Amino acid sequence: MRQDESQNTLVQIETEITVLMRRAEASRRATAVAPHRALDRAAYLILRQLEENGPQSVNGIAQALSLDGSTVTRQVTAMERDGLVTRARDSNDGRVIMVEPTRSGRNRMTMVRRARLELYRDILADWSDDDREDLARLLTSLNTSISRHMSRRD
């Protein structure tokens, strides 16, 4: 590929990711009572992380999600106040505080996940199975590359 074609491709990728992020945010806010909005994005990500990997420390959550520990601490505090998570000392190391989802937190996360799956099912209804699989594979690859890039910067 020639350099100008490569540059044009990068410009298109940058533009499309910017548009994607804007449209994703707009679709999230589209209606005030939409089920996929029952949790804010940060709470949803934290609950998903806890569901997939079990109870974790704030630092473990922050590292897994590439977030600052103080940001996760503030979010976990709000989530605890809302009854979505609990915090308790680690039985193996009493200095570490572990975060665990409550039943209410798990239920809300499950409800939001179902609503989001339905939203994307509707959005991608006219895509072939192969195209959806390609999109999933490429998004996974993109997120892996972004994480790798971010870890090199630390």
Image: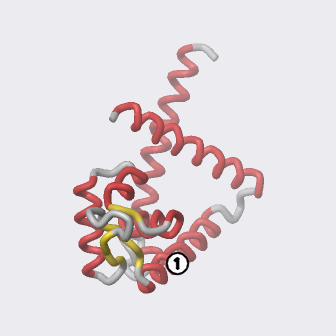
- Residue at 25% of width from left, 58% of height from top? 71
Which residue does the numbered mark 1 point to in the structure image? 110
Tell me where residue 80 sits by quadrant: bottom left
- Residue at 45% of width from left, 59% of height from top? 24
Name the outermost residue toward the top.
2
The answer to which of 142 and 76 lies nearer the viewer is 76
Label 1: how many Cα within 10 Å (few below 14, some 14–19, many 20+): some
The answer to which of 134 and 81 lies nearer the viewer is 81
Looking at the picture, does residue 49 appear above or below residue 102? Answer: above
Residue 36 in picture, x, y percent from top left: 47, 74
The answer to which of 101 and 138 lies nearer the viewer is 101
- Residue at 59% of width from left, 42% of height from top? 141
Q: In this view, does 60 lie to the left or right of 71?
A: right
Q: Quadrant of the N terminus?
A: top right
Looking at the picture, does residue 9 appear above or below residue 25? Answer: above
- Residue at 46% of width from left, 63% of height from top? 49
Q: In this view, does 48 lie to the left or right of 121?
A: left
Name the outermost residue toward the front.
92
Tell me where residue 93 sits by quadrant: bottom left
Residue 26 in picture, x, y percent from top left: 40, 62
Residue 67 in picture, x, y percent from top left: 33, 51
Q: Quadrant of the C terminus?
A: top left
Q: Is mark 1 on a helix, strand or loop?
A: helix
Task: Count how many numbered circles sit on residues in the image.
Answer: 1
Type of residue at label 1? Answer: Thr
Q: How is colour applied across the structure in the image?
A: secondary structure
Q: In this view, does 71 lie to the left or right of 46?
A: left
Residue 50 in picture, x, y percent from top left: 45, 67
